[in-house]
Image (cartoon, rainbow, N blue to C red):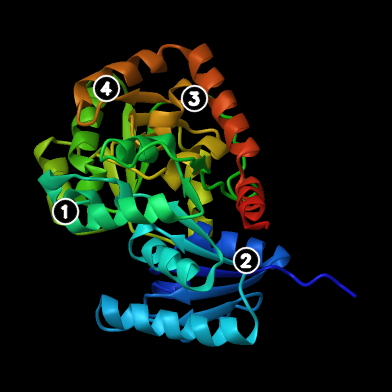
Amino acid sequence: MTNEKIRVALIVPGGIATGKDNIGVPVLERLVRLLSIQFEVTVFSLFRTNDDFVANTFELVDVSGNGSLSKFKKCSDAFRNRHHKKPYQVVHGFWAMPSGFLAVLISKRYGIKSIVSVLGGDAISLPEINYGQLQRWLPRKLIVWTLANASEVTTLTKYLWDNLLNVGLGKRKVNVIPWGIDVSQFSYSTKNIGSPVRFLHVANLHPVKDQFTLLRAFKLISESSNATLKIIGEGVLSAEVRKLTTELNLDNKVSFVDPMPYEKLAEHYAIADILLHTSLSEGQSEVVTEAMSSGVVVCGTAVGLMYDKPEICVGVNVGDYESLAMKVLQLLKDTQRMNQLKKEAHIWAMEHDIDWTTKMYAALYQP
């Protein structure tokens, strides 16, 4: 008699079989595929999935609908039908709201283990840009209840957990599990700083990413060094970011590149010297992890992984473009420190790759 695989239900708000060319959230999809080697995985997606996506190693169930109640009912019904035929042992919600909340409700109904992963906006309050689920009373209360009642809680970073502690979550056990990447895709590149110094920024052009601080910092940097900046991304602030670029007389130093397939990004990290990342908040920031794996020094605001690991990057307070520029210019004069940052960041990325993350999740799924 062979041992049957543990059955795991994953609830996601999207990120699998979504977007152009099914790009979704690449790291999330890769994690699911790796987990499905060891476990029997069903993914319930609260967001409409693309018809041409092929899951192969796991079951993908579209439970999207019009409004939260419709999605919750469809997900609950789909779970019940499958659970009665062959029971699940674990239900795992990605993002506390709405997926984690629903996972905890299901776990209480069927008496199985629940895991909730806090991944970003579910642990943030930025009322100045109307961002983050903690800024409103009801979502905040539901998130606190969800995390207090889950069997296990994971966060990408200590940064997120510290934010949650500030809204009264209490001192429960939490597992800080960053999302690792496939380091073979973002291989380490040994290169000397040249002229111009090649800066890179990869992000949606969105208020939370704060490209205004990015450009103001780069303006000061470029006044004291020969430098270029490549911005890869698009978004609601595209026009405003391009306008500020012109106002700062940076058109001949800043280039804009449209988003591209995930696997193509490695080519840009391979030729970059420094990643400039100036977000107001981050869950972790996969681009920071990709840069560290690729031998690109990370400089920016101390949020997400840069908050957790100040020893392997250069960080400043949110919005402080003057200090960021000053620290970057100091770093450019210190080749030894730059090389040390590259080395230590690369070691961290290798030790916390996607296989490590999969192993950490797998341990939580055990009885």
Picture disc at residue 312: 3
Secondary structure type for disc 4: helix
In whole angstroms, how far apart are the C-alphas of marks 3 and 4? 18 Å
Picture disc at residue 33: 2
Q: Earlier in the sequence, mark 2 or mark 3?
A: 2
Q: Earlier in the sequence, mark 1 or mark 3?
A: 1
Give how far across and how far down residue 303 sits, in percent.
34, 34
Location of the C terminus by quadrant is bottom right
Left or right of 252, for residue 41: right
In whole angstroms, how far apart are the C-alphas of marks 1 and 3? 34 Å
**Front of the two marks 1 and 4:** 1
**Front of the two marks 2 and 4:** 2
Location of residue 253 by image quarter: top left
Q: Earlier in the sequence, mark 1 or mark 2?
A: 2
Say which amino acid is labelled 4: Ala
**Of residues 117 and 235, the one drawn nearer to the viewer in this rendering:** 117
Picture disc at residue 325: 4
* Res. 319 visible in picture: yes
In whole angstroms, how far apart are the C-alphas of marks 1 and 4? 35 Å
**Of residues 356 and 251, the one drawn nearer to the viewer in this rendering:** 356
**Front of the two marks 2 and 3:** 2
Q: Identify which residue is drawn at 22% across, 22% down.
A: 223
Q: Earlier in the sequence, mark 1 or mark 4?
A: 1
In whole angstroms, how far apart are the C-alphas of marks 1 and 2? 35 Å
| Residue behind mark 1 | 136
In whole angstroms, how far apart are the C-alphas of marks 2 and 4? 41 Å
Q: Identify which residue is drawn at 51% across, 43% down.
A: 178
Q: Earlier in the sequence, mark 2 or mark 4?
A: 2
Say which amino acid is labelled 3: Ile
